[in-house]
Image (spheres, grey):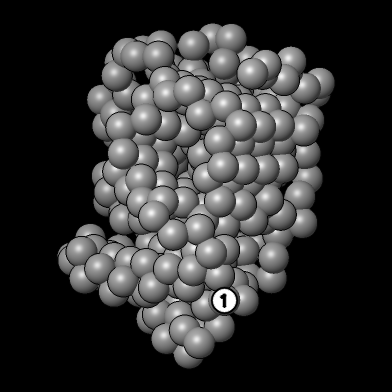
């Protein structure tokens, strides 16, 4: 599950270590997760078993053709830099084929990925001007979470993830409220909403709360999503051609990789424009 190739972007300070660096990872995402035959994966694979397309040098034999081969889920995947942290820091350069690391490394990886995802959101929250009053608390949470990631393998496995996740989530909710209040767009709570396949062409969704919304296959062409909170929203197959997500908050590379955009889609500056997006814009919807 290597990160989808994309045009180089310019990450904000602090995010560089939270971006996948496959060259310094032992392809943990190609081994640790279980896969099930679906629209995202062409095969069944149990957790801990290497993907049959994984080569001995930890490279994917079909990396350039993942979508064509039936693995869009792999093309969209992003580990927030957890792969290289586990490979080079937690296990000091030992790969999962080494007896001391076998099994243990593959169990630590998903824990580290969740911690790195929290770090991604906290780092972004620190850049949000409307949430500047929260910066001391956000910095403290960032330092505490980063400290946890440097623990040994067993301490990471023994970690109760619910505790740091709850603390961070409470801060992110407050930051989101401050951003959306400044957008002056009240009454737009679509948190967790079932919007699968919804027709939202040209919708004014400025400042909307779309946390964990189900937007699979939704038509968001030319929608205005500025200052909208998209944390945890499922954007698989969502049509984003011409949409404005330039100031959407808590958007991840995984979400962009899983969606369908074009040259006119405006995305947050932290993220890369996926290579599979159309170079030309789709026809604009008619009234």
Residue 75 image offset from top left, x and y in percent: 55, 27
Residue 7 image offset from top left, x and y in percent: 77, 39
Residue 184 image offset from top left, x and y in percent: 53, 64
Left or right: residue 35 compared with residue 88 = left
How many marks the image carries: the answer is: 1
Residue 193 image offset from top left, x and y in percent: 31, 39
Q: Residue at x 56, y 42 (%)?
A: 204
* Residue sitting at the far front: 287
Give the answer, above or below, for where 1 lies relative to 250: above
Question: Mark 1 highlights which residue?
Answer: 130
Q: Residue at x 42, y 24 (%)?
A: 198
Q: Secondary structure at mark 1?
A: helix
**Which part of the image, by quadrant, shows the C terminus?**
top right
Q: Quadrant of residue 50?
A: top left
The answer to whether any part of residue 100 appears in the image is no
Mark 1 crowd level (few <14, some 14–19, many ≥20, 10 Å Cα): some
The answer to whether any part of residue 157 appears in the image is yes
Q: Residue at x 20, y 64 (%)?
A: 162
* Residue sitting at the far right: 280
Residue in the foreground of this view, choosing between 143 and 93: 143
Give the answer, above or below, for where 215 lies relative to 23: above
Q: Residue at x 51, y 29 (%)?
A: 200
Residue in the foreground of this view, choosing between 264 and 47: 264
Left or right: residue 168 compared with residue 64 = left
């Amino acid at each position: 599950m290597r990160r989808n190739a994309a045009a180089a972007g310019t990450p904000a300070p602090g995010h560089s270590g939270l971006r996948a660096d496959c060259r310094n990872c032992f392809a943990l995402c190609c081994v640790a997760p279980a896969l099930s035959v679906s629209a995202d994966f062409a095969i069944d694979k149990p957790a801990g078993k290497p993907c049959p397309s994984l080569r001995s040098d930890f490279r994917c034999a079909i990396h350039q053709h993942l979508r064509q081969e039936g693995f869009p889920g792999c093309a969209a995947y992003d580990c927030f830099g957890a792969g290289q942290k586990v490979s080079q820091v937690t296990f000091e350069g030992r790969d999962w084929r080494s007896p001391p690391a076998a099994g243990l490394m593959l169990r630590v990886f998903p824990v580290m990925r969740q911690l790195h995802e929290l770090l991604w959101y906290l780092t972004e929250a620190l850049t949000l001007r409307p949430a500047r009053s929260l910066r001391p608390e956000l910095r403290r949470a960032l330092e505490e979470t980063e400290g946890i990631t440097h623990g040994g393998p067993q301490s990471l496995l023994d970690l109760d993830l619910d505790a740091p996740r709850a603390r961070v989530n409470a801060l992110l909710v407050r930051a989101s409220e401050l951003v959306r209040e400044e957008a002056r767009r009240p009454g737009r709570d679509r948190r967790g909403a079932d919007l699968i396949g919804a027709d939202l062409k040209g919708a004014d969704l400025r400042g909307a709360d779309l946390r964990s919304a189900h937007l699979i296959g939704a038509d968001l062409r030319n929608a205005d999503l500025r200052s909208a909170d998209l944390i945890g929203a499922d954007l698989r197959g969502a049509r984003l051609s011409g949409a404005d997500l330039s100031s959407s908050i808590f958007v991840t590379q995984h979400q962009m990789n899983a969606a369908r955009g074009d040259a006119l889609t405006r995305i947050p500056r932290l993220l890369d424009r996926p290579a599979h997006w159309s170079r030309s814009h789709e026809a604009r919807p008619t009234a």
